[in-house]
Every structure is written in C-alpha cells, then in structure tokens.
C-alpha cells in the first residue's frame, strides 16, 4: 500500500487536471468570442478603449440657498 501522502497527491492530480482542462477551455472560448466581437464591431472596441482613459464626470454641485426646492426638502 502506498504512503498516505502519495494517495493524497494522486487524488489531487486526478481532481486538478480535469478542472484545469475545463477552465482552460472556458477561458479560450471566452477569448475567441471576444476576438470575434472585436472583429465584428471595431468601432465599439475603439469606444471601449477610449472610455477606459476618459475622465470621470464631475461631481454634482449642491443647490443654493435661494433654490425653489430648498424649503420643501429641508422641511422634511
């Protein structure tokens, strides 16, 4: 009978190889799909790249003291 650590190592190898193969297949399918999407819509790809480097929108300003909604919202 083999040692316990060898049995554990064999079990982990039998478990890890199929999981790695399935995960690799899913990642490759996702990459191929992204490639076909980029080839089918190159303008959308360019917009995504530009959007990644665009500045975020400015934070909204608070309303002034003379704003007509101010008394309604402050009163509640």
Image (cartoon, rainbow, N blue to C red):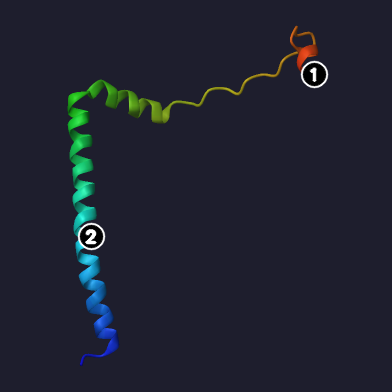
Q: Position of residue 53 (x, y in %)?
A: 41, 29
State the quadrant of the C terminus.
top right
**Disc 2 designates what residue?**
20
The residue lying at 22 percent from left, 78 percent from top is: 10
Name the secondary structure under disc 1: helix
Q: Position of residue 22 (x, y in %)?
A: 20, 55
| Image: 70 above or below 18 | above
Circle nearer the N terminus (2, 1) = 2
| Occupied quadrant, residue 71 | top right
Q: Which mark is residue 51?
A: none
Q: Position of residue 61 (x, y in %)?
A: 66, 19
| Occupied quadrant, residue 50 | top left
- In front: 74, or 44? 74
The mark tally for this picture is: 2
| Image: 31 above or below 24 | above
| Image: 46 above or below 72 | below
- In front: 17, or 38? 17
The residue lying at 25 percent from left, 83 percent from top is: 7
State the quadrant of the N terminus.
bottom left
Disc 2 from disc 1: Cα separation: 59 Å
**Disc 1 designates what residue?**
74
Q: Is residue 49 left or right of residue 59?
A: left
């Amino acid at each position: 009978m083999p040692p316990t650590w060898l049995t554990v190592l064999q079990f982990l190898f039998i478990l890890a190889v199929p999981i790695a193969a399935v995960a690799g297949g899913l990642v490759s399918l996702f990459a191929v799909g992204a490639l076909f999407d980029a080839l089918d819509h190159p303008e959308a790809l360019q917009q995504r790249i530009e959007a990644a480097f665009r500045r975020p929108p400015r934070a909204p300003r608070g309303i002034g003291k003379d704003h007509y909604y101010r008394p309604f919202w402050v009163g509640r």
